[in-house]
Amino acid sequence: MRLNKDNQYIRMITLLRERIEDFDQFPFSLPAISTFEQLRFHPNVTYIIGENGMGKSTLLEAIAINYGFNPEGGTLNFRFSSFDSHSVLEHFIRLSKGVYKPKDGFFFRSETFYNVASFIEELDAEPGGGTPIIQSFGGKSLHEQSHGESFFAAFMERFSGKGLYILDEPEAALSPIRQMSLLARIHELVEDGSQFIISTHSPLLMAYPDSILYQLNDEKIKKVTLEESEHYQIMKQFFDNKDRLLHHLFRS
C-alpha cells in the first residue's frame, strides 16, 4: 500500500534561519539555500534538481544526516568515515516526521558508494559476524561488478520496501535502459509503502507521475513540472533540432 500525506515518513523540511549567523558563509551563501523557508515532501517521490553548484546535493545530504544516516551513505546502521567533507547544514534544518517509521532505509550517494562497498567488505571479513551483509546486495562483491551493476544491485536487491530512500544522482553509472528499469523499481517500492527523495540530472528519472519537482537555481527554489524543468527543455531542444543546436554550439 502506497503512502499518503497521513502516513508519509518525512513531511517537511524547515530552515532554522534564526540560528544562522552569517549568510555569506557556505552553504548559506547559495541563493537556493538562503531563500527557502520550508519545503513539503510528496508522500511518494520528491525530486531536487538543478545545475551543478546550486546546492541540491548539499540539501539532500543535510536531510539524510539530520534523519540519522551516515554522511557517506548506507543504512541507518552504517557508521564510518573515509573523508569528512559534508557541510554543516544539517544543524540548521528541522525535519517534520510522520507518526510512522520506515522499516527500511538507505542513503545512496553515487560519489561515495565505493566507500560503502569497501565498508561492507570490511564488516564481512570480521570473524563471527553472522550472515554476510553482501547477501542483502545479491551475494556478489560490489567491487567485482561495474559501477552500474553495483548501483543496480543496491536498488534491486538491498531496497526491500516500506522504506525511506534518499538517492543522490543514482543515474550516474546507469545507461538509459537501466534508468528506466530504476524508474520501474521506484514504482514497485512506492506501491510497497516507500518514500523517495531524489537528486538527479536525468529527465528519465524525473518522470515519475506521483511526485514533486523542486528546481534550484541561482535565485531560489521553485516547484516545476517535468516539462518546465531546465533538464527536460535542454534535452527536448537537442532532439527536436540537433543539427541547429550543434551548429550554434560549435560556432560559439
Image (cartoon, rainbow, N blue to C red):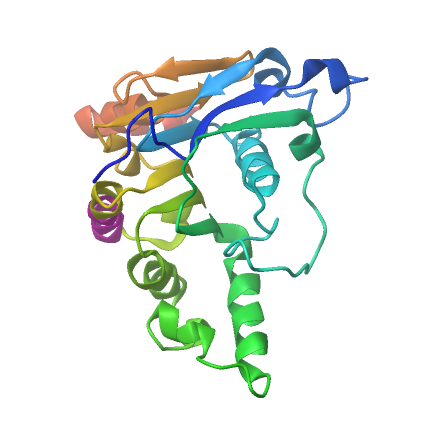
Q: Is residue 128 left or right of residue 141?
A: right
- Asked whether residue 12 is drawn in magenta, I would say no
Q: Residue furthest front?
A: 99
Q: Work out which quarter of the rendered image holds the C terminus and state it.
A: top left
Image quadrant of residue 147?
A: bottom left
Q: Is residue 2 left or right of residue 151?
A: left
| Image: 21 above or below 164 | above
| Image: 173 above or below 201 | below
| Image: 89 above or below 72 | above
Residue 6: % across, % down: 33, 25
Image quadrant of residue 37?
A: top right
- Asked whether residue 177 is drawn in magenta, I would say yes
Does residue 145 appear in this view?
no
Residue 101: % across, % down: 43, 42
Image quadrant of residue 222?
A: top left
Query: Which residue does the image show at 24% across and 28% down from the upper left?
Result: 210
Query: Which residue does the image show at 57% across and 30% down from the upper left?
Result: 53
- Region of the chain picked out in magenta, as a range: 176-185
Residue 144: % across, % down: 42, 77
Query: Which residue does the image show at 68% across and 59% down from the upper left?
Result: 81
Does residue 75 appear in this view?
yes
Query: Which residue does the image show at 28% across and 52% down from the upper left?
Result: 175
Residue 76: % across, % down: 53, 53
Q: Is residue 165 left or right of residue 219?
A: left
Q: For the stretch drawn in magenta, what is the main secondary structure?
A: helix
Q: How many numbered marks have been drawn onto this rendered protein structure? A: 0
Q: Residue furthest right?
A: 21
Q: Work out which quarter of the rendered image holds the N terminus and state it.
A: top left
